[in-house]
């Protein structure tokens, strides 16, 4: 069955459609794609905004927190009137008002060992904007076992980091544990409540996460697979560091020791 754009969709996505690398077929791919974003905070907010604006047909949002005044300096999906409201509900309201084409699925729950596989399994790409190391490792491992591409970012003070793990090609893509074999001890990494965070850094890195997701869906450009992008807001510099697959990695190495999901202590929060 051929796909037919409505007149409104042609107007809405015209700047995409005239791009030779996207075109009508690419926009159709976006409308039929499914992206899951873990966290509706400083990273998830800009990523979700641009994914919805781009016409990603189904967007899942996982977050069990509520909107707080301290979030509003960086979490642009939310506003003052929604303080106290679940973040997934606030995000859903904002995204549906922006683009009625998008089906927003809200998961107002903590992601854990018992539900992570069921939540992730039906999505094409996963973006991790979570605020603690245990969730990051859990999401990474689940994506690895399910063969899902994962776009991971982190922010603190004036710095941001971003990389993409394409677990559709496990033989060649490094994994999150090649970079960090296991979570750091609780308290080793300061939270943004302790160290602070320039809000716009989340906007920059979250938007880049959305960019990675769109490239993966459209199969264009070069995703940041095997590369770690590091951003310094004070110097406005981007640097790219090569990431190599670790032969001794406990998850994706030659003799893996991690063969099932591990749920770490939630004490080591990073509160991004």
Image: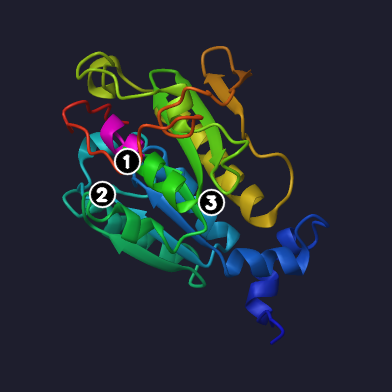
The alpha-carbon separation of the residues under discs 3 and 2 comes to 23 Å
Are the two marked residues, 3 and 2, in contact with CB atoms closer than 8 angstroms? Answer: no
**Mark before the other along the chain sequence, 3 or 2:** 3
Q: Position of residue 80 (x, y in %)?
A: 25, 47
- The chief SS type of the magenta part is helix
Instruction: Report x, y in % for residue 148.
Output: 50, 51
Residue at 31%, 43% (x, y): give it: 260
Residue 111 numbered mark, or none: 2
Tell me: residue 259, above or below residue 192: below
- Helix, strand or loop status at disc 3: helix
243 sits left or right of 5 in the view: left
- Number of the front mark, 2 or 1: 1
Secondary structure beneath dot 1 equals helix
**Vertically, is 140 above or below 188?**
below
Q: Which residue is mark 3?
A: 50
On the image, the x and y values in percent for residue 131 come to 30, 34
Residue located at (20% from left, 46% from top): 65
- In the rendered image of this protein, does residue 211 appear above or below residue 22? above
Task: Tell me the residue at 27%/30% (across/down).
Answer: 271
Tag nearer the camera, 3 or 2 = 2
Q: Which residue is mark 1?
A: 138
Q: Nearer the viewer, residue 270 or 84?
A: 270
Q: Is residue 247 left or right of residue 225?
A: left
Q: Which residues are magenta?
A: 130-137
């Amino acid at each position: 069955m051929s796909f037919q754009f409505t007149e409104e969709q042609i107007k809405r996505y015209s700047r995409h459609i005239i791009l030779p690398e996207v075109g009508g077929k690419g926009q159709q791919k976006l409308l039929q794609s499914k992206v899951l974003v873990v966290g509706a905070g400083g990273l998830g907010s800009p990523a979700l905004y641009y994914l919805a604006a781009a016409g990603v047909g189904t967007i899942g949002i996982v977050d069990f927190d509520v909107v707080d005044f301290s979030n509003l300096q960086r979490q642009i999906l939310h506003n003052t009137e929604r303080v106290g409201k679940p973040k997934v509900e606030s995000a859903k309201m904002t995204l549906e008002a922006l683009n009625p084409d998008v089906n927003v699925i809200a998961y107002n729950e903590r992601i854990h060992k018992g539900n992570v596989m069921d939540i992730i399994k039906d999505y094409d790409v996963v973006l991790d904007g979570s605020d603690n190391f245990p969730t990051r490792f859990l999401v990474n491992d689940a994506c690895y076992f399910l063969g899902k591409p994962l776009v991971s970012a982190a922010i603190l003070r004036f710095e941001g980091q971003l990389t993409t793990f394409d677990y559709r090609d496990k033989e060649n893509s490094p994994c999150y544990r090649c970079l960090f074999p296991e979570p750091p001890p609780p308290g080793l990494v300061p939270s943004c409540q302790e160290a602070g965070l320039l809000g716009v850094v989340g906007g920059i890195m979250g938007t880049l996460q959305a960019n990675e997701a769109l490239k993966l869906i459209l199969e264009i450009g070069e995703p940041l697979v095997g590369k770690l992008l590091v951003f310094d807001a004070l110097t406005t510099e981007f640097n790219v560091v090569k990431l190599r697959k670790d032969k001794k990695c406990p998850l994706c190495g030659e003799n893996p020791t991690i063969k099932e999901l591990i749920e770490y202590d939630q004490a080591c929060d990073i509160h991004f």
